[in-house]
Amino acid sequence: MAGAEGTAVGAVAQAEAGRLMSQERAARIAQIRPIIARVGKRNQLLVKIVTEDGLVGWGESGMSSREGAVAATIDHFAGFLLGQDSRQIGRIWQECYRGQYFEGGRVLTAAISAIDIALYDLLGNRLGVPVYQLLGGRQRDVVPNFATTMAATKDGLVSEARALVDAGWDCIRTYPASFVGEAVFDPRATLAQTAQELIAVREEVGPNVHLGVDLHHRYSVPDIAYLCDLLPAGTLNFLEEPIRCETPEAYETLRRMTNIPFAVGEEFASKWQAAPYLERGLAQYMRLDVCNVGGFTEAMKIAGWSERHYIDLMPHNPLGPICTAATVHLGAAVPNFSWAETRQSPVEELGFHDPELFPVQITMEGPVYRVPDAPGLGVSVNEDLIAEQTVTHIEAPHLRRPDGSVTNW
Ligand SMILES: [Mg+2]
């Protein structure tokens, strides 16, 4: 009898091993394809990953205007990822990041981000669950957003802000009017004008709307110190990217010169870049970009590290429906969240969420995205239509100062 039972147990174990092996075989990566798509006024670098059983996952890279470099990196990674188990997402992240002597860098992590997001989409599709379920489950029903005002005049900024408040938005991020239509940009010449614009917008929206300004890291420490001195207390809830982020010590200097909270992080390409900003109190909102920082795998680690410092995520989300979906799933799954950036609002129409190119995408309800129930990211891509688009390279403006020297866009 014992022998017969042993044989039966052995047969069950053998069947189970066979089942797991066939699952593993089905989940192997069969194809990784970067696709540069023209969507609205920008290009979007998508990645499509297909497994042996024909399941598809989509990801997006956030490195605008350097899509070719990221696409080449994705092709390179495909050389060693084909045939691997698509479910081993964390291990694949490590191999892409550390599988060479020269680790990291923005181009590499932009490529890793797109692959990581696509692998999560694939796994969600495989298991029939939304991506947020793979990240610990849903912590909120909707993901709130801030909108952006961009106008060439103070009056234009004020009227856009009014329109947003009237439509129910409670967080507005504005740009200085001097950012519109410039090939020559003189940061110092427009500080007083920018201060007047911010004061006027605050007067218009009242004290209960959160108001920030994105300075696109175009300024120096003394420029920003002066701008802040021109602003009455309570004008701003956050300063976004006032200076470049390569040197945290410069932010430490600036932190001592103003008490306006900083929203920093969209340029970070890893948790290692985020670390000094979190640990030294230099970011009061974490602006990570899931499509650049290393996908969900890296973003969730930075989210946890931010939570440890009571810092809310305020994700950068300037591109298309896949980036938006990834941001929404991330925002749904973390406890520490304020607003996501969206470029879909009553005062902006950039065409980045073209419904013909992306027939299924996450829908907005006023200023929030409803957290979706569909498996994976919940986005579909019309590949045939994307293939018909003519894609030409779009270079971000190269700004210069009045004396001819280079300055940041
Ligand atoms: Mg920004």
Image (cartoon, rainbow, N blue to C red):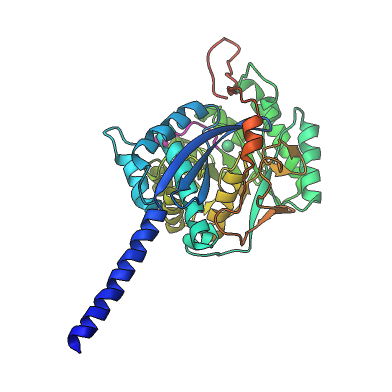
- Residue 339 is situated, as x and y percent measured from the top left of the image, at 61, 51
Residue beneath the point at 43% across and 49% down = 52
Inspect this view and state whether residue 57 appears.
Answer: yes
Name the one closer to the observer, 270 or 179: 270
Inspect this view and state whether residue 230 appears.
Answer: no
Left or right of residue 166, residue 305 in this image: left
- Residue 244 is situated, as x and y percent measured from the top left of the image, at 49, 31
Magenta segment main secondary structure: loop
Residue beneath the point at 56% across and 53% down = 377
245 inside magenta stretch: yes
131 inside magenta stretch: no
For the image, the number of numbered tags is 0
- Give the farthest residue toward the top: 403
Quarter of the image where ligand 1 sits: top right
Quarter of the picture containing the N terminus is: bottom left
Left or right of residue 87, residue 354 in this image: right
- Residue 73 is situated, as x and y percent measured from the top left of the image, at 41, 32
- Give the farthest residue toward the left: 3
- Residue 233 is situated, as x and y percent measured from the top left of the image, at 64, 45
Name the one closer to the observer, 85 or 369: 85
Left or right of residue 180, residue 53 in this image: left
Residue beneath the point at 77% across and 28% down = 153
Residue beneath the point at 77% across and 44% down = 346
Q: Quadrant of residue 16?
A: bottom left
Quarter of the picture containing the C terminus is: top right
- Give the farthest residue toward the bottom: 1
Q: Is residue 144 above or below residue 389?
A: below
Q: Quadrant of residue 372?
A: bottom right
Q: Is residue 16 above or below residue 54?
A: below
Left or right of residue 143, residue 56 in this image: left
Q: Is residue 59 above or below residue 150?
A: below
Q: Magenta residues?
A: 241-250
